[in-house]
Image (tube, grey):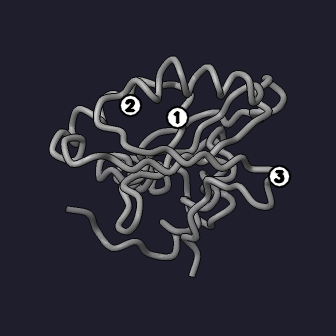
Amino acid sequence: MHSELDGYDRKILALLQEDASLSSAQIAEQVGLSQSPCWRRIQRMKEEGIIRGQVTLLDRKKIGLNTQIFAEIKLNAHGRSNFTEFTEAIREFPEVLECYVLMGAVDFLLRIVAADIEAYERFFFEKLSLVPGIQEVNSIVALSEIKSTTSLPVLR
């Protein structure tokens, strides 16, 4: 169970989402707290799972992952009965950055990165299409990125 977030907590979270390398002293100064209470708030939010981790975000294009694909996956009846097998297989593919279970005409939506279309084609034929239970894959290539963020709207 987690506690209700107050204004200080929300400001702390907003700052950490923008720059997780800030020290608790730097955060405390920006939100108007002393260092110790600020540090305790951060620790509490980590313990409660509100702060799940701290990572370094990379520019995918600068490391050669120029293509982003959204794949809509439809499972066959057998595949739907083996949901766990499918999800475990997808978790093993580093090319798949996100996977969502959907309601509607398709069962899953995957966000996949690759160096180029040829690399995605190899991933598709050598990995994705071999996952048991897949009936249909509809691949949608993203032409450009209008907005991409990891920041949640924590400030009200």
Label 2 crowd bin: few (<14), some (14–19), many (20+), radius 10 Å: few
| Residue visible at 41% across and 51% down in the picture | 108
Q: Nearer the viewer, residue 101 or 55?
A: 101
Q: Are marks 1 and 2 in contact (CB under 8 Å)?
A: yes
Tell me the quarter of the picture where residue 130 sits.
top left
Q: Which mark is residue 21?
A: none
Q: Which residue is mark 2?
A: 91
Q: Nearer the viewer, residue 61 or 156?
A: 61
- Residue type at mark 3 is Ser
Tell me the quarter of the picture where residue 28 sits.
bottom right
2 or 3: tag closer to the N-terminus: 2
Q: Which mark is residue 144?
A: 3
Q: Which residue is mark 1?
A: 96
Residue 151: where, in percent of width, then height? 61, 58
Q: Up-down: is 134 above or below 102?
A: above
| 3D distance between C-alphas at marks 2 and 3 | 26 Å
3 or 1: tag closer to the N-terminus: 1
